[in-house]
Amino acid sequence: MQNRQYYLDPFLSEFDTSIVSASLIEDKYHVVLENTIFYPEGGGQPSDQGYLNDSKILHVYEKDNQIYHVIADKLYESKVKCRLNWDRRFYHMQHHSGQHLMSAVFYHYYNYQTKGFHLGEDYATIDISTPTLSNKIIADAETRINKLIYQDIPIRCYFITKEQIGRINLRKKPTIDQDIRIVEFAGLDAVPCCGTHLKSSGQVGLLKIIKTEKYKSLTRIYFLCGQQAQQDFQFKHNIIVALAHSFSSSEGDVLERVESEIESKRALAQEYKHLQKQAAYYQAKEIVHKAEKDLIIVNLDARKSTDYAILLADEILAIGNYIVIITVNNRLVLAVNRTAAFHCGKSMKKYLSEYDGRGGGNAHLAQAYFPTKEKMKQFIIQLENSIYQNG
Ligand SMILES: [Zn+2]
């Protein structure tokens, strides 16, 4: 393990070493170095990124105990300068050490085991062995984890042999039987782990649980650490401040204000719906009173909606048996009573394409849209003629 510099010093971001071999596989060079600061993908932690001289590292992986660095260009010198994408590595370390703390708290205080760990680009998750998790436990566990961060517990990483396993109180059993690496938070937790870790829990900075969801028979917990947690706080804090300002409320009362606004909007919408129906009722009466034939054509004000047009058609049809055409802008609603022989959808479909209209519907109600008012007018004349021809 001497050629894994990332274990000896996970805070090293630049390093000079030599190339041992470089094999060309599908247009890419898979380079083995004498010693490396680049962590290969494994144990839930993604691979590091960075450069070998000026060549961008596309991937780092381990195969048969050998670490391969995949690059696109051939390197001509045997000596190379390794430069690590430190921000990404630190993000991984904060979230990986944070994960150990969280798994330790859920295990030691609540007896839930960690069954999965995912370290993504924007957040990390663990899956713990319970199908449900109350808000109280989430909040209490988060507080405990952050207290352990303040305590700045030293983190120790070391290798043991198979025979030494019994001497350590491990939270979970190792899956391999040689080169067993232990990550230990002094006096709190020890587990086999191959990832890169911080020097002490304090470097996690902050851990925030973002959300939880049921995942198979487990609970998936989404969380953020360090800078990402702080940025998330900043982002959400700005939203709360802006919301409170919009509602002329304090940050503490803003949720209540928003909820009461939603409630009053709901009541207003109901009132509006009621008034619309009433307006449609009286307008329908007036229209029917003036109607001379059983085909009624109404051109509504451009400010009206097609929802109102349908409401109005319903009210007209409640009074008698008519064929109703209502237009709003370039939109048209065609409706008849449920007992009528006339089929709205079919009649509409028959002539629609001739006037570049789009739409359709069922036997009693159909809607269409036309590119111009003129086209719609022609369509109505056509429809009218066909109605009178048929009876
Ligand atoms: Zn780990």
Image (cartoon, rainbow, N blue to C red):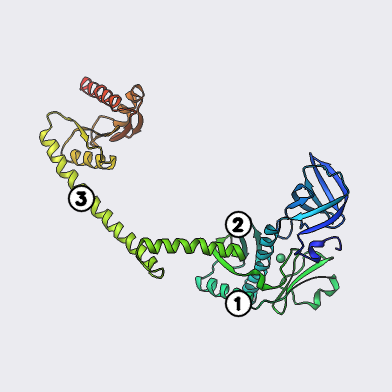
Q: Residue furthest left?
A: 289
Whether ligand 1 has any atom under 8 Å from the Cβ at mark 2 is answered as no
Question: Whole-percent x and y of residue 65?
Answer: 84, 57
Looking at the image, which residue is at 29% across and 31% down?
344
Disc 2 residue crowd, few under 14, some 14–19, many 20+, Cα 10 Å: few
State if disc 1 and disc 2 touch (CB < 8 Å): no
Disc 3 residue crowd, few under 14, some 14–19, many 20+, Cα 10 Å: few
Local SS, label 2: loop
Identify which residue, 149 or 189, lies in the foreground: 149
Q: What whole-number distance in Å separates the C-alpha atoms at marks 2 and 1? A: 24 Å
| Residue 275 marker | 3
Question: Whole-percent x and y of residue 187?
Answer: 71, 80
What amino acid is labelled 2 in the image?
Asp
Q: Quadrant of the N terminus?
A: bottom right
Looking at the image, which residue is at 60% across and 57% down?
122
Q: Write down the residue under mark 2.
A: 122
Question: Whole-percent x and y of residue 247?
Answer: 35, 62
Local SS, label 1: helix
What amino acid is labelled 3 in the image?
Leu
Residue 220 appears in view:
no
Q: Mark 2 vs mark 3: which is more N-terminal? A: 2
